[in-house]
Amino acid sequence: MSSILVDPDLHEQYTTLMGKVEPLMEQADKTIFLGDWFDTFGDHNVEEMCGYIKGTRGDEKIVKLLGNHDCHYFFDHNGFMCSGWQPRTRMVVDQLLEPADIEEFKLFTQVGKFVLSHAGFHPATLQYFHPTVEKEALRTAREGGFDPIFSAGKARGGWVPVGGPTWLDWNQEFVPLATPQIVGHTYKRGQVRTKNDQGVMSYCLDSGLKHVMWTDGEEVEVVEL
């Protein structure tokens, strides 16, 4: 049985990544990072995070998802901007990461019955859950444009009713779907949260990197770091 490790928002917590997450990754068949590699209100470790991204390029055991705090450094359109942006971080990202490093990032992935993305899908955004849509949206972003899949909803200061998979707010916008989801994005100190509808359980892991999750695609186990 496959053992998949799911890691929530990192926000440059490089010491925790290397000291507590990496040893678990050695036990995993695959590791999925839910996005938000950058931006922090504590110690800044942008060089280290860029080095880790570059050093794991091509590693088939690692899946890197995009968060809203990554998009505003990887892409140029002003539609990607959000709080926490640092000009120095953008400078370092531009210096250290190559297009090939950024092109490995995805918007979503699926493990068994679970759909994983940074923030989640809503009934109003399910049209985005398609590999062709994802491919075209990422191509547009790399070319300096902005696809609606990246939009923030009104709950997070955007103009659309609900956010896309890099922006959907767990507290105010997320609703359980027939397909269970695993997301990060909406922080609550030290807590992993669930939403359940008719036996379909979805999970929000953004507890400040206090937890990770193991899954085989059917069952989950939340582990405190």
Image (cartoon, grey):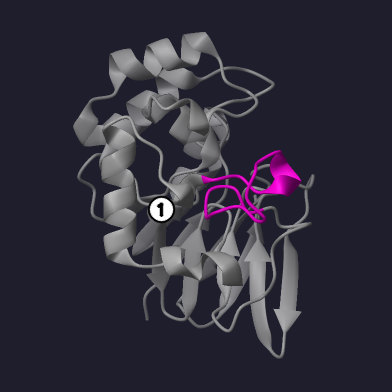
User: Does the segment drawn in magenta span residue 36?
Assistant: no
Q: Residue furthest bottom?
A: 198
Instruction: Name the residue: 69% across, 22% down.
Output: 41
Q: Is residue 173 left or right of residue 113?
A: right
SS of the residue at dot 1? loop
Q: Is residue 139 left or right of residue 45?
A: left
Residue type beneath disc 1 = Leu
Q: Tell me where the magenta segment starts and ends, as one range.
A: 151-168
Q: Is residue 78 left or right of residue 191?
A: left
Does the image show residue 225? yes
- Residue 101 placed where, x, y %? 26, 34
**Which SS does the magenta portion mostly show?**
loop
- Residue 82 placed where, x, y %? 60, 29
Instruction: Name the residue: 33% across, 16% down.
Output: 94
Does the image show residue 56? no
Q: Which residue corresponds to mark 1?
A: 107
For residue 179, what is the image quadrant? Answer: bottom right
